[in-house]
Amino acid sequence: MISFEVLGRAQPAGSKRAFVVAGRARVTDANPNAKPWKALVAYAASEAYDGPLLEGPLVVVIRETRLRPKSHFGVKGLNAKGRASEAPTTRPDCLKIARGVEDALTGVLWHDDSQIVAEMLVKAWAGPGERERTQVVVRTFAEMDDEIYEAGMPALRLVCDDGTEVTR
């Protein structure tokens, strides 16, 4: 299992912009903050793991923790609006955060993000005294255990070419 966290607000990736310069097409990420954030993710991953690139199917859990907006607080702490908001439902969406993490970890932890066979994405509010951060856990499919199931990951059933079944 590889586990690490990146402090700061996660930056979405996935949306692209295309334009022509000197007759050649250029494609860039629509979010100018995505590239430095991906570099932070890659750095944190390389600090947590210095082995060879992972092989085979992988399971990834990504948890983005955000600070609550000031509008969630009153004089006595959380106000009605804050208590009613169980988790962040504003942009960016979980998939765009995951794309940024997946892109950053290609060539650092795995060969290609197509190796990911199961993924759990969570956006949550930071608790008192917590900072904004993104936590990432990567396991090989063979390492899956009760901890993943407790986190809400459903059991996975694979049917092999020969008809045999594997349940994790």
Image: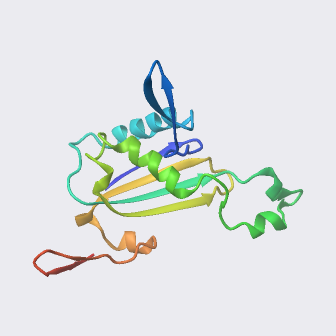
Quadrant of the image containing the N terminus: bottom left
Q: Is residue 95 left or right of residue 76?
A: left
Q: Against 119, is 113 above or below?
A: above
For the point 39% across and 44% down, which residue is it? Answer: 103
Q: Position of residue 71 (x, y in %)?
A: 82, 54
Q: Position of residue 152 (x, y in %)?
A: 45, 73
Residue closest to the eye, 22 or 85: 22
Q: Is residue 138 left or right of residue 66?
A: left
Give residue 61's quadrant in the image: bottom left
Q: Tell me how many marks there are.
A: 0
| Residue that protrudes farthest toward the left in the picture | 162
For the point 55% across and 43% down, which residue is it? Answer: 11
Give residue 47's quadrant in the image: top left
Residue closest to the eye, 31 or 142: 31
Quadrant of the image containing the C terminus: bottom left
| Residue that protrudes farthest toward the top in the picture | 22
| Residue that protrudes farthest toward the front in the picture | 23
Q: Name the colour scheme.
A: rainbow
Q: Position of residue 111 (x, y in %)?
A: 25, 45
Give residue 84's quadrant in the image: bottom right
Q: Position of residue 37 (x, y in %)?
A: 51, 37
For the point 69% across and 55% down, which residue is it? Answer: 128
For the point 31% across and 71% down, which residue is it? Answer: 145
Q: Is residue 138 left or right of residue 82?
A: left
